[in-house]
Structure formats: C-alpha cells, structure tokens
Image (cartoon, grey):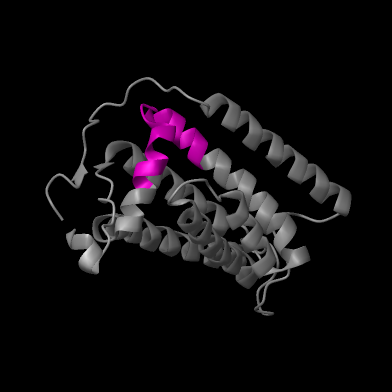
Amino acid sequence: MSPRTLRRPFPHARPARGPAPLALAVYGAVTLITLGLAYALGRSPLATDPWHGSLEPGGPTAHAISIGAGIALAAATILATRKLVRRWSWARALHHDLRPSIDGAGDATLLLLGIASAVAEELFFRGLLAPVVGLVVSAVAFGALHRLRGRAGLVWGAWATLMGLLFGSIFLATGSLFGAIVAHATINVANLRFLRDAEVEPPAPRRLGGLLGRT
C-alpha cells in the first residue's frame, strides 16, 4: 500500500451539510412507528425470550451480558474495518463511494446520525422483526435496505447482512436489545468519523489479463 492510499486531510471538519436533518427525521419517525407497533402488539421491542433459558428476559444479567457482547463486537468490527480498507481493493472502493455522503459533516452531526440510525434500525429489524420472522430473514431485510448502486453496492449490502446476523444473534441469545444498540451505535459513530477523515484512493481499474492485457 502506498503512503497516498490512506490520508487524513480533515483535522477540523467543515460545517455539516447534506441530508442529515432529513435522515434524522426519518430515523425519528421509524423509531416512533416501531414503538407504536410494538405497543399495539403488546410486547417490548427491547426484550424477547432468550435462546439461553437461564436468562430472564429483560433482566439485569441479560442486559449486562448483551452490552458486554455488544462492546466486544463493536471493537472487533471497528478494527476489522480499518484493516480491510488498508488491505482490500473492494473495501477501498466502498469507502471511496460512501465518503461523499458525509464529507464535511461535523462531529455532533455524525454522533446524532450514528446513534439515531442505530436505535431506529435495531428497534425495527431486531426488536420488532427478528422474534417474528427469524434471525436470517430480518438480517437479509436489513442488508437489502443498505444495498446501494455502484461497484461496491453489493458488498455493502452483504456486509450489512452479516452485521445484521451478528446484532440479531446478540439480541436473540441474551433476550436484550441493549447490546445490539450499543454495538451498532459505536460502530456507526467510529466508522462515520473514519469515513469522513480518512481519504482513500480508489483502486485502479483492472486491466485485461493475458495477451489482451499486453496489447
């Protein structure tokens, strides 16, 4: 990797711009709708019957284990993100394609977006959907929501599906949604800042191999 592959040109972010206010409004609406649906169904989106029968749904032990697992998942994911961007061309392409969406956003904006999106998505996809449709279906739906156009769109959707499986596993294994929310929000905020601050050169287009590549 050349020294120009990964740079940090923004020691001080410019004032926020772009669709952040609209995104926050959408996340707020999704949160309210999910809470309303959960209330209508007569159940909490923050707790469910855990896979491990010894854990009390919504109990302090379940919450503690869930949060601990969430912190561990967040740390591993944040570290993996940086290693992938340095190592793999598809990760650099994804970073390059996503970066314009938050270019110039301030720390407060990224913090609000990271937390709001994590709360809304975890309440809906894990808290509301996962106990009803199952872990795999809810994760695939989560990945489909994150599917983007462009060269790295499929990778982003697959990555979101994997993360949906991990978030959902924490929730369903412990019966507590708090760990998934903590993990999701921490990953969001840390990786949004990384996305904004680290300028990554996109991978060079692949050339045709063999005899065609020499012509």
From what the image shows, is residue 74 above or below residue 50? above
Is 170 or 61 nearer to us in this picture? 170
Image point (45%, 46%), residue name: 188
147 horizontally vs 210: left or right: right
Image point (31%, 60%), residue name: 84
| Residue 156 location (% of width, % of height) | 48, 54
Predominant SS of the magenta segment: helix
| Residue 195 location (% of width, % of height) | 35, 42
Magenta-highlighted residues: 95-114
Image point (70%, 40%), residue name: 30
95 horizontally vs 62: left or right: left
Residue 98 counted in the magenta span: yes
| Residue 124 location (% of width, % of height) | 69, 50
From what the image shows, is residue 20 above or below residue 149? above
Figure quadrant of the C terminus:
bottom left
Figure quadrant of the N terminus:
bottom left
Image point (71%, 68%), residue name: 134
From what the image shows, is residue 125 above or below residue 96? below
Residue 185 counted in the magenta span: no
